[in-house]
Image (spheres, helix red, strand yellow):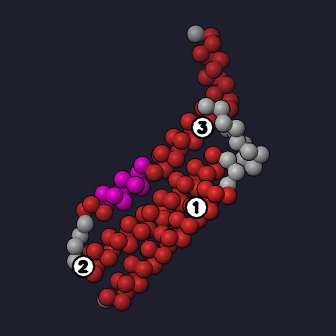
Amino acid sequence: MTVIANILIVSTIVVGIIFTIVTVIGILRLPDVYTRAHAASKSATLGVLSILLGVFLHFWLIKGVFSIQLILAIVFLFITSPIGGHLMSRAAYMSGVKPTELTVGDDLAEVVAKAKNTRKEV
């Protein structure tokens, strides 16, 4: 049982480290704020969640301690990190930061233009 538990713990922590490395590469190499926010919110969330899951499994399976704090940290991070990335990207869009040419389309432009026109009419 201990060998299987150690394999499970090490594999989740290694997966977390890999996702964290992908996050760093994405933040350094991607061209604009939108793609960087995507890399930071998605892969960093998976990386930290995997590391926290590995730590939780270590304490639960090896030490025999069921940590509610780690479960709450995992849930809180899972809920708040993608929302934070979305809000930062939306704030950048609303403040007028232009995406690079690599970004495929701008589906929000029509909605923002329509909202500006309705504000002028009022």
Pick out the residue farthest to the left: 65
Residue type at mark 1 is Val
The mark found on residue 92 in the picture is 3
Compared to residue 112, the image places residue 14 above or below, namely below
Residue 68: x and y in percent read: 25, 62
Q: Quadrant of residue 89?
A: top right
Pick out the residue farthest to the right: 101
Earlier along the polypeptide chain: callout 3 or callout 2?
2
Q: In which quarter of the image is residue 73?
A: bottom left
Compared to residue 88, the image places residue 30 above or below, namely below
Q: Camera-side residue: 115 or 17?
A: 17
Looking at the magenta stretch, what is its main secondary structure? helix
Q: Camera-side residue: 16 or 29?
A: 29
Frontmost of labels 1 and 3 is 1
Residue 105: x and y in percent read: 72, 43
Residue type at mark 3 is Ala
Q: Is mark 3 on a helix, strand or loop?
A: helix
Q: Is mark 2 on a helix, strand or loop?
A: helix
The answer to the question of whether label 2 and label 1 lie on touching residues, with beta carbons closer than 8 A, is no
Span highlighted in magenta in the image? 71-80
Residue 105, magenta (yes or no): no
The mark found on residue 63 in the picture is 2
Q: What element carries label 1?
A: helix
Residue 63: x and y in percent read: 24, 79
Q: Quadrant of residue 70?
A: bottom left
Question: Do we see residue 104 in this rendering?
Answer: no
